[in-house]
Amino acid sequence: MKRYRRIVVLAGCLLLLTGIVRGQERWPRSLTVSDGSLVKIYEIQPESLQGNTLKARAAFSFSGRDGKDPAFGTFWMVARVETDRDNRLVHIISVKVPNVKLSPQSDVVNVSLNYLRAEMETDYLKSELETGIPTLNLDLSLDALLASLDMSTEEKNLSKGLNTNPPDIIYQSRPSLLVLIDGEPMIRYNKDWGVDVVVNTPFTMIKGNDGRFYLYGAHHWYESPAATGPYTYVRTVPSSLEKVQCTVDSLSNADPGYEDAGTAADSSVSNIVVRTRPAELIQSDGDPMFTPIPGTDLEYVVNSHNDIFRVTGSGQYYVLLSGRWYRSGHLEGSWQYVSSDALPAGFAKIPEGSPKDKILASVAGTPAAREAVMDAQIPQTARVDRKNTRVNVTYDGAPQFEDIPGTHLQFAFNTPIPVISYQGKYYAVDKGVWFEASKPTGPWQVCTARPEEVDLIPPTCPVYNVKYVHIYDVTPDWVYVGYTPGYLNTFVFGPTVVYGTGFYYHPWRGHVFYPRPWTWGFNMWYDPWIGWTFGLDYGPDWINVDVAWGGGFWFGGWWGPVVYRPPYIAWNPAHRGLYGRNSYRPGEHLFRYGNNIYHDRPGILDREPSERVTTDREGNVYRRNTQGNWDERHDGAWRPVNGTPHRQNLERQEQLHDRGMERSQNFQWARRGLFGGERWNGGGPRELASRRR
């Protein structure tokens, strides 16, 4: 009976999900214009997306009130959009239609719409489309949009000068965990707990009243004579630490998705490795065991959570760390950087859907890499209330500023929030919003234009990520803003994306500790829908973000904005890969998710696929007929497409469309079946307007 119920529930989920995924593509959409004529708009085809401006075209048909055959044509539009990266949606807010083109004139004659040409000369149809399209409440799939964009589009937002030098790469042949301390341990008294704590680490590290150090994570205690180790697992600890354990457990349990996601990590005891400088830990459970990848000369370490490969011919090892490749003759040896376009050919041949296809986003020339580069240039947008949005900037002592090389800017280094001084004014960036003030202590108001030289900030500066926070538009009541993933430590580097700048930034060590963004140490790996995530070794209750430290507060900032912590995914090693059709299956992932620091905005996927009518850049209208062949609208009728180049171009366009639908479907599988709609969002609420209530 239980088995039957599970089957029924699963079938219901499949039907629901199928409706959701298919619902993204219900075309055409119908629009009744002011004279009673019917306009049908076919699938929107994007040409470029920069900031919050989408340029696109679409095929349409125009049916007069006389009921005769419709006229077909193409219109071009420039739309202002809002992007919701968490739900992978692009919502059209307003539209300008600069051009409309009808198919050959016989279409107009066939529908007895001679007046249409005169009306078009007075911009009638343009005006009707501009007025009507926003009322259709269109939500476009971000993945479909990315896949359809012209891959030859110039990428202007590439990050230059990132650091590729390897960190200290440590190999262990037993289950281990890397614990980072930023420099020498910095100890402060926690009045709530009645004990000293190490504040310059994102881990729960305590100095007990007995003078020994205790590390807590995944429901286990470890003990050491020094903060830097060596640590050993202990079953009992002094009673003075009970309050610490209760606080950490309660905070972890309050985090959506914690209970299920933490089960696997909580069950094992780790070998603790401590470092006080940038490092990465790669490991295997026992001696490395290799499995070949069919169709390549590669094999990978199957008993490891890391991406460790070996080339069968040369015996060289390759490891992927924070999106960067390193090579060595031995796992315990010295490692050298290898650019993503200089890898052995076998890496690009790893098939989509295979257990190691998640590395394809870091292999130059692959569709996954191109999609990741394009995704890294898509902003998360929001509308900010100019009158009621505020920020509180605190300093540890009087504000202290330092020059930013190559600019006339200065940045404050004794505050957790980026503050920039420029031409006698002060600018702060908090939760993806620019603020300005006449003094470094405020009062602050929402900024309407960021400093001109922000784009010149080099990656060696700890506030480098603010250059990826933009201001798009301003009205008397609202400022339209957005940030690209660079704000969250994701950068385009040549033909792929990487995590972090690779540089080490000195933190602020005063009465309190303010960390700076780190590149290394958390086994970050790239997921095509949610970006960079913690490695599996870091269970959800190892990293703490909400623990108060006596006279101050534990501040975020290890991964970018103070309020941000990357997601955590419990990855099933038996998965079928990230890419390819139906690669995600319910139950394979458990998410700690929430990369939208503007917080949730409603977005419902309720489209359903229908007739495939498309258009090219010249405005010619095509359809894919029931036999799978291409027809062109010409002389008032559909006629077969002649000429190989035309068909090849249409096939390429269709492949990009299908890949976008595939990515969108896989994301919906993951989102609907794997975390049940619950998401973690760091930080407190911001006064952002929801586009729908």
Image (cartoon, helix red, strand yellow):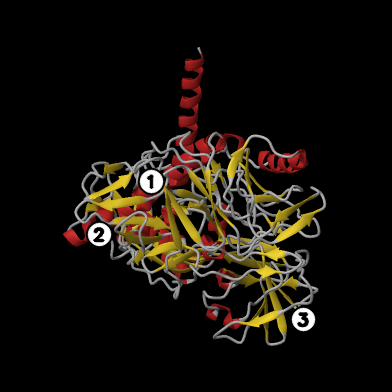
Number of labels in the image equals 3
Q: Secondary structure at mark 2?
A: loop
Res. 142 mark: none
Report if residue 207 is visible in the image. yes
User: Residue shown at 78%/56% (left/top)?
Assistant: 189
Q: Which residue is mark 1?
A: 662
Q: Nearer the viewer, mark 2 or mark 1?
A: 2
C-alpha gap between disc 1 and disc 3: 50 Å
Amino acid under disc 3: Ser
Q: Residues within 10 Å of mark 3 (few under 14, many from 20)?
A: few
Q: Position of residue 572 (x, y in %)?
A: 44, 38
Amino acid under disc 1: Glu
Q: Can you tell which quarter of the image residue 315 is in? A: bottom left
Q: Position of residue 84 (x, y in %)?
A: 56, 54
Q: Residues within 10 Å of mark 2 (few under 14, many from 20)?
A: some
Horizontal side of residue 220 vs 241, given as left or right = left
Q: Secondary structure at mark 3?
A: loop
Q: Which residue is mark 2?
A: 344
Sequence-wise, the earlier of marks 1 and 3 is 3
User: Residue shown at 44%/75% (left/top)?
Assistant: 160
Outermost residue on the top side: it is: 1
C-beta proximity under 8 Å, tags 2 and 1: no
Sequence-wise, the earlier of marks 2 and 3 is 2
Q: From what the image shows, is residue 241 above or below residue 518?
A: above
Q: Residues within 10 Å of mark 1 (few under 14, many from 20)?
A: many
Q: Position of residue 145 (x, y in %)?
A: 43, 56
Q: Can you tell which quarter of the image residue 107 is in? A: bottom left
C-alpha gap between disc 2 and disc 1: 28 Å
Q: Which residue is mark 3?
A: 438
